Image (spheres, rainbow, N blue to C red):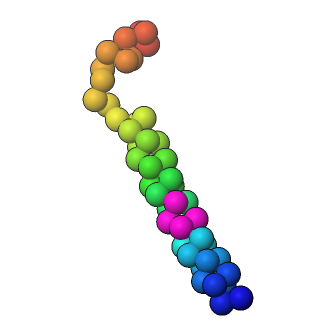
């Protein structure tokens, strides 16, 4: 039974790490959208 307890602990750690990585990646992608690095993208707004 100790093996299953250990395996569950490892899986929880992996899931938390994966969630944190996805959250950081999503935040970076969200912030990239607010950049003003491509003035050509706003050419249609006149």
Q: Residue at x 38, y 38 (%)?
A: 32
* Residue 8 falls inside the magenta stretch: no
Q: Tell me where residue 33 appears, x and y as whole percent.
A: 42, 35
Closer to us: 37 or 19 = 19
Image position of 20 (left or right of 34): right
- Quadrant in the picture for the C terminus: top left
Locate residue 45: give its quadrant.
top left
- Is residue 16 at all visible to an observer of this figure? no
Q: Main secondary structure of the magenta part?
A: helix
Residue extending farthest to the right is 1
Image position of 39 (left or right of 10): left
Image position of 17 (left or right of 39): right
Residue extending farthest to the bottom is 2
Number of numbered tags placed on the structure image: 0
Q: Is 16 placed above or below 35 here? A: below
* Residue 17 falls inside the magenta stretch: yes
Locate residue 1: give its quadrant.
bottom right
Q: Tell me where residue 9 appears, x and y as whole percent.
A: 60, 79
Locate residue 7: give its quadrant.
bottom right
Closer to us: 18 or 41 = 18
Q: Is 21 placed above or below 17 here? A: above
Q: Residue at x 44, y 49 (%)?
A: 25
Give the residues in magenta: 14-18
Closer to us: 24 or 40 = 24
């Amino acid at each position: 039974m100790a093996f299953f307890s250990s395996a569950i602990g490892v899986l929880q750690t992996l899931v938390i790490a994966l969630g944190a990585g996805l959250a950081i990646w999503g935040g970076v992608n969200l912030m990239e959208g607010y950049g003003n690095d491509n003035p050509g993208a706003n050419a249609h707004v006149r």
